[in-house]
Image: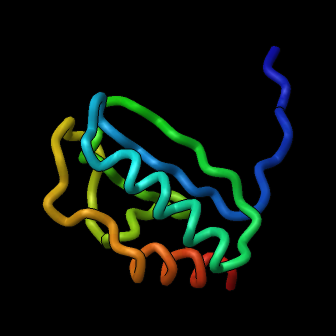
Amino acid sequence: MCTTGPEIRGTRVELLTAPDCPNAEAARSLVAECLAESRLDASVVERVGRYRSPTILVDGVDVMGTPGPVAGDACRLDVPSRERVLAALTAARG
């Protein structure tokens, strides 16, 4: 029988990268800086796999507004920007 786990509350931030992504560290730093600047208390879940890399999701939505699945295992041409990350965090704050 399955039991329910703890309810997830608050804003979900995810950093999705492909293995050996040359932009992963910059994206990681960008997320940390934007979280500090927005004063939003959220933990960041990092996933490495077959993703368009790097992808930053806030509450499951790509901050760059790219629709569709995030699978791809390739470098992104539209690398997440500071403005987009801050806007997504501000919107999540409500």
Q: Quadrant of residue 45?
A: top right
Location of residue 83 with respect to 72 vertically, above or below: below
Residue 86 left/right relative to 77 = right
Colour mode?
Answer: rainbow
Location of residue 31 with respect to 25 vertically, above or below: below
**Which residue is depicted at the point 34% across and 73% down?**
81
* Number of marks in the rendered image: 0
At which x and y percent is residue 47? 47, 36
Residue 65 left/right relative to 82 = left
At which x and y percent is residue 11? 67, 63
Residue 62 left/right relative to 37 = left
Location of residue 21 with respect to 80 vertically, above or below: above
At which x and y percent is residue 13? 57, 56
Residue 60 left/right relative to 10 = left
Is residue 81 at least partly visible in the picture? yes
**Quarter of the picture holding the C terminus:** bottom right
Is residue 50 at least partly visible in the picture? no
Q: Nearer the viewer, residue 17 or 67?
A: 17
At which x and y percent is residue 83? 41, 82
**Which residue is depicted at the point 56% across and 68% down?**
33
**Which residue is depicted at the point 35% across and 53% down?**
55
Q: Nearer the viewer, residue 78 or 29?
A: 29
**Which residue is depicted at the point 82% across and 14% down?**
1
